[in-house]
Image: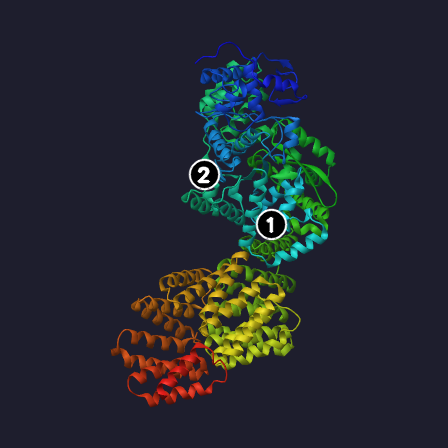
Amino acid sequence: MACHGTRIGPLQGAFRRMPANICRFADYELDRSAYQLRRKGRPVQLEPIPLDVLFILADRRGQLVTREEILERVWGKGVFLDSDNAINTAVRKIRHALHDDSDSPRFVVTVPAKGYRFVAKVKTAAALDALVGVPSMPEGPAPIVVGREAELARLQSWSDQVLEGRQRRVVFIAGEAGIGKTTFVRAFLDSLGGSAARIGRGQCVEQYGAGEPYMPVLEALMRFCQEAHGRRVVELLHKFAPTWLAQMPSLLSHADRERLQATAQSVSQPRMLREMAQALETVAAETPLVLVLEDLHWSDFSTLELISVLARRTEPARLLILGTYRPTDMLASDHPLRTMKQELELHRYCEELHLQLLSEADVATYLARRFADDDTARPLVAIAPLIHERTDGNPLFMVNVVDYLLEQGSLADASKIEAPRSVLQMIERNLERLNPATQRVLEAASIAGAEFSAAAVAAALERPLSEIEATCARLSRNEQFVAAIGTSAWPDGTVASSFRFLHSLYGDVLYGQVPAGYRVELHRRIAARLEKAHGERAGEIATELAHHNSRANDRNNAIEYLQIAGKRAGARYAMVEAERQYTSALELLAELPETPERDRREIALQLAVGPVLMAVKGWAAPEVERAYTRGRKLCERVGELAQLSSILYGLWVNHLERLELRSSYQIGEELLQRAESVGDSTMLLQAHHALGDTSNRMGRFPLAREHLEATLPLCGARRSRPLGVDMEVVCRSCLSWTLWFLGYPDQALKMSHGAVEVARALSDPFSLTFAEIFLCYLQYHRRDVRALQGTAERVASICAEHGFTYGLAHANLFQGVAMTAQGRGEEGLKLIARAFTEHREAGAEGNRPEFLYWLAEAYCATGRLDEARDTLNNALEVAEEHENLSLEAEIYRLKGEFLLRRGNSNSAQAQACFQRGIEIARRQSAKSLELRATTSLARLLDKQGRRDGARAMLAEIYGWFTEGFDTADLKDANALLNELSG
């Protein structure tokens, strides 16, 4: 089919009726009111139909426009023509008018078999009104991008899926230093044009960024919130991610800040990750969201966890995460990015674009584009091979070589290429071309950081801010070394322009050129100015201040800010970063002379790092013991008895979880002795709890009751949470366990319910989880399967909401136990086995005999008797080796039941096990366990015809009880007594 005659597209008249609206890109202007394309103010000859097509493409900049849509909108429905030829002709004429190249397009990209995409950066009044956020990339002329067409097309294809809401994407852009990752990302973001996408950027910084949890993400969020329509982002964060909003106090009123920060105390890192995932998805539901995180090879661990969580969520979202990194740096430092990326790649949760060195043809294309309006453009192609040979196709090096040759006065003369092969040498040579004053500004900027405020540089050089801003702005306009990235505002009212180095290598070279003594002084000046500017809010930049003070050789201030940074990281449940901050502080502290004041500071740090190490390494980790042992030595040396109680309590937990019960009991005795000597109620509370809990596990139940009952009057109105759980909740829960063993099941249940009520009244989800887990233990011992199932499900719900993985392992365990008791053995076995693994991975060994006992029960329920026997023998070995004897009597009883299930020939061995269980229970005063073992033995004796002896022993123990007659154990004993009396 052919098109007959020339036809004016329907868009022509429509554009003529529109108000004045000029669309600008590169050197061109599309004027809708004049229905005209101009270049540098001069009209460009373009026929109506190609002009209509260009208006459509520019209006949908960054988006795929299908051939079908172009056909319908330009020619209308029902028009018969050779559509492929007509559209191809129009696009060819557009490219001719724009001096565009289909092989290396700057403006119109062909999407094979689908349509076209207009990729130039566009500026229109309408587009600026429509944009919700402004890309926080370096300002200045659009970069010249060559040799990246295939990668850009792939990224734009993935971006289309995101913008259309079909699939979220996480894309890693890899390449070595100078390969052009930032330029590539900027070119892609420019191609989005006015697509109304929110674009946020965060920068990972080597100098002090690795220890600041979520730093690049918080940076991007701050930019979202401070830009146009940012209040909406704040509203969504307030609703869906209040914990994150609490980390950005400058966005909040004083009242909101205090309220949110108080709320944040009871959350965990999994909850923070879940909050941010939901918040970002909600923001993206309103407007597509592009999050750029640069230099992930310097990223903190928590940011990587967030990327992983976002990537693994299967729900579609208009969310695109772009992360850049250097493979060499990642591999050399064994960065956690490597493991995280490999895991995501394995499950196809991410994509990667690996940028390669430029070819000789790419270098020629770059030269032709950069000097398109220069008469010397043609000779440039001739020297492209020489430039490629000297630079190996490294884009950063190539640009520096060209700049150098320009400075020499002739680009076409090949004999002028005398640049050194090293990129660093080239940067040094380009720096030498600057005047000394400008060099000093850049050197001070390298001290301030990869991104810096002109105010920090002004403070370092003790020069007027306006002078520094003018110098940096001039460099940015000339695309030399730095680029403008907006403004920064400090709490004292200082507002200044902000800049970033175009490449980290620039900062590295400059930093290395500053003499050591002068470098120390510049760091000192910047630290002092930042401290003064932030005042009471200096803690918000504690990591940055720690860095500058450390480089200024001010160890005392550096230690103080590292300690603050560690505390802030811990408040965000970013325990890996908190450990690094505290460890760095301890390393600096070790360099100070030994004095009582230094020792007191170390005590505080060891106390702070202990719980963090428990979270990162596990409660039983040797690092935990070393921290508390060192703290104990220092406390004794300087006489800090108040601090010593917390140190001893931490040591007690460590030994308890390592199943070193004798050592943990000795620590409890020492704690009690010291508490009584000084009359400190908090120390007494911790001491009695330590001794009571340890006695419970050792099977010394009367002693455990004595200590735990002594804790209750000490709890009082003053709440204490040394382990993160309210002490009254802890003590009531432990006491409920003791009361059951001693034969008071009703009092035990009342005590456990009391612990749950206290936790609920405190609105403390962590304490509530603890209380409910102990209630599960009690319901299991009472054999109340239905109640156990309900409580376990409730625990699972609380833990899922707040991200308590430790509690979730217990919830899974008890759900598995309940399933086993209800005849669903295989399901129960899987849950118990998984919970056992999760428990041990969390570093908790204290309940290993109990877990093995329940695992053995599940094996028995599924008929796997050999595995049940082996597991039970393992439980006995662990219990006896570590003196964890609370269930020893019950393990012997269960072993006897297993032997009977294997055949009557084992009855003598089974009887010996039951008798052994009774002996142990009597020695421990564990009346509930004595009742169980006696019931099992009485049933066996009855089968052997020894009914009188069976009835006598069972009646004796049954007659001891004064409560709990509705429990399963006492009902079974009573029923058997009736049978034996019949």
**Does residue 641 lie above or below 179 as drawn?**
below
Rendering coords of residue 456 (x, y %): 68, 41
> Does residue 689 show up?
yes
Residue 351's disc number: 2
Q: Quadrant of residue 896?
A: bottom left
The amino acid sitting under disc 1 is: Ala
SS under mark 2: strand
SS under mark 1: loop
Q: Tell me the quarter of the image containing the C terminus.
A: bottom left
Number of numbered discs on residues: 2
Q: Tell me the quarter of the image containing the N terminus.
A: top left
Rendering coords of residue 817 (x, y %): 42, 66
> Does residue 629 show up?
no
Q: Nearer the viewer, residue 640 or 116?
A: 116
Rendering coords of residue 231 (x, y %): 67, 42
The amino acid sitting under disc 2 is: Glu
Query: Label 1: which residue?
Result: 241
For the residues marked 2 and 1, what is the alpha-carbon distance in whole angstroms?
A: 27 Å
Q: Residues within 10 Å of mark 2 (few under 14, many from 20)?
A: some
**Does residue 70 lie above or below 721 as drawn?**
above
> What is the residue that sits farthest to the top in this orientation?
5
Residue 300 in the figure: left or right of residue 713: left
Query: What's the colour scheme?
Result: rainbow
Residue 542's disc number: none
Q: Nearer the viewer, residue 573 or 282?
A: 282
> What is the residue that sits farthest to the front in this orientation?
78
> What is the residue that sits farthest to the left in this orientation?
905
Q: Quadrant of residue 139?
A: top right
